[in-house]
Amino acid sequence: MNVSSAALDEYDLYANPILMKDESRKRRSSFEESIHEQIDGNTRMEFGYYTKDMLKMTLVQLQLTHRLSQHSNPQGKDDPYILFVESDHWREIQGVTADKQRFRQLLLESPRLLQISATHPYFNSKIFDMDVLTKSIDANLGGELRSGSWFALNQLMCRSTDSWQYHNLNFKEYSRISLNRLMQITQDAVRSLHQLVMLPPLPQAFDTKNQETDGSRAALNFLLARLSGLGAGLQPTEPPPNSDGIKSIITKIYELLLGIVLIYEGFQSKSDEMEIDSLYLPVLQKNGKDQTETTDNQPFDNSFKIVPADEWRLMKQRCIGVVALFLLFGVQGWFGCFKNRKKYTYCDIYSIFTLALDMSSRGITILSSQTEPGLHTPWRHLNGFLADLFRTTRIGCPDLNWYTAMYIWGSVLEESTISYFFLLDVFEEMKDPGKSLSSTGSEAPPVKATNEEWSKSWKELLQLALIQKSAYQTLRQQLALSKGFQPQTVVPALPSQQFEGVDLWSFMQTQCCNTDDQSEKKAKEELLDSGAKMQKK
């Protein structure tokens, strides 16, 4: 990659992974099991000691890119896309996404949703030797098992023909799993936007004679639009939302945040030579058999019991892996990479971290513009939302406050909000698909449509349901003239827009110390009022 390996791998972890096998053999005695658990857990906890600076540098560059590019919007930041949820066409959208055979084909025609873009600013021949980069697609480099880091990278560039499946062997299976997951999440997301359908603006002057009639008609339209957003208008024969829906993306976001906290905690525990788990999670009791201690102040109550040597250790690895995938690939990396814990290690996660660090050191992030002018960057809306969340909570910055960060997380990570940005990305790519990177390192051929009529009608439908802000305002004026007061879709605000100008830390301290109900109520009203004023601006 034309970069010194020492610059990326300061601790030489490729050559000497943090396994501590020799030391553990010397120390094992009658307490072999407990010592092994301690070394095993602390070693992975210390992963943050080696990667915290890498994480901070990458996140700061991501926030900078987000702030400068405004989601790399080729249409212009003043005329973004809007989902026309309250329109009659939204029920048609729900019907198409519920048709598995049809929607599967339509998703396949937009390969950049699951594959690296052919116009990616980092994964190209100017930076990589593509012959080397693609060699591991057809060969298990490093021994009998395919390296988890190589597999994660090659999984996102394994197309070579214009048909499905993309490749053979395990790439074929994981491509199928990724597509199914994308399809199920989209099906669920189109039925999760009802909370964004809000009351229409009130008329400036009421006609007393017609007030009851106009009001009841407006209420009727509002309730119908909300029910439509819930998918109530679908045919009974159409399948219900799958359990692996939009909540799985929200889960990944929380795992992303937890992984970041673990990296910070790992750095702190290593720096302070802490031997106990600084998160004060339940500990393993040795009373004849393994038991999990449950206490009233446990973060997840009894429904989420943690055994440090097993579930908790695996969860830490998974969450830190989610962080690495996001920094290098964005949301795209969550669909099919690092799904089998036995097939990727901390060395694989570290490898992904070093690539993300090199990418950011070149001024490139998951939000950077494509090499082809005017072509949008895949997943720019949801990736941008998360970058804005990092910016608002100051993650990666010296003035980071975890208490205010927790408050913001709990306020903005709503199902309807994540669904909205997720669908913006999916529908934008389906409306204007780009080309993906092939298994040879060149541009992969477009996926051939098996039913041209499906593709044509879907593109026409997207023109009516995914529209730009200026067109949306015009359509709403026309609807108001023809049908009276109509409900409207409220576009979710970014975290920075919601909390700009709000002294959140002072507010939280007031809430902590205030015992007067009236004062507490007044403080809440002042916070909400200041936030509303900033949003209005």
Image: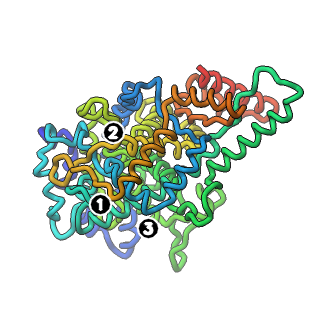
- Label 2 neighbourhood size at 10 Å, few (<14), some (14-19), many (20+)? many
* Quadrant the N terminus occupies: top left
Residue furthest to the bottom: 288
Q: Is residue 270 visible?
A: no
Q: Is residue 224 rendered to the left or right of residue 400?
A: right
Which mark is on residue 310? Answer: 3
Mark 2 and mark 1: span between their CA atoms?
23 Å
Task: Please say whether residue 343 is visible from this viewpoint.
Answer: yes
Q: Which mark is residue 23?
A: none
- Rendering coords of residue 483 (x, y %): 70, 34
Mark 2 vs mark 1, foreground winner is: 2
Q: Which residue position is annotated with label 1?
A: 345
Left or right of 316: which side holds 298?
right
Is the residue 275 above or below the residue 418 in the image? below
- Give the residue type that dot 3 points to: Asp
**In this rendering, is residue 458 above or below 139?**
above
Q: Which is closer to the viewer, label 3 or label 2?
A: 2
Q: Nearer the viewer, residue 271 or 369?
A: 369
Q: Amino acid at mark 2?
A: Ile
Taking depth in this image into account, of 453 and 479 the one nearest to the observer is 453
Residue beneath the point at 23% across and 43% down: 118
Report the residue marked by disc 2.
366
Q: Could you give the CA–CA distance between mark 3 and mark 2, rounded to whole angstroms?
A: 33 Å
Q: Mark 2 or mark 1: which comes first in sequence?
A: 1
Q: 258 above or below 401? A: below
Q: Amino acid at mark 1?
A: Thr
Q: Are marks 3 and 2 in contact (CB under 8 Å)?
A: no
Q: Which comes before the other along the chain, label 3 or label 1?
A: 3
In this view of the protein, which residue sits in the foreground, 490 or 319? 490
Percent across and percent down for residue 154 are: 23, 55
SS state under label 2:
loop
Q: Residue furthest right?
A: 209
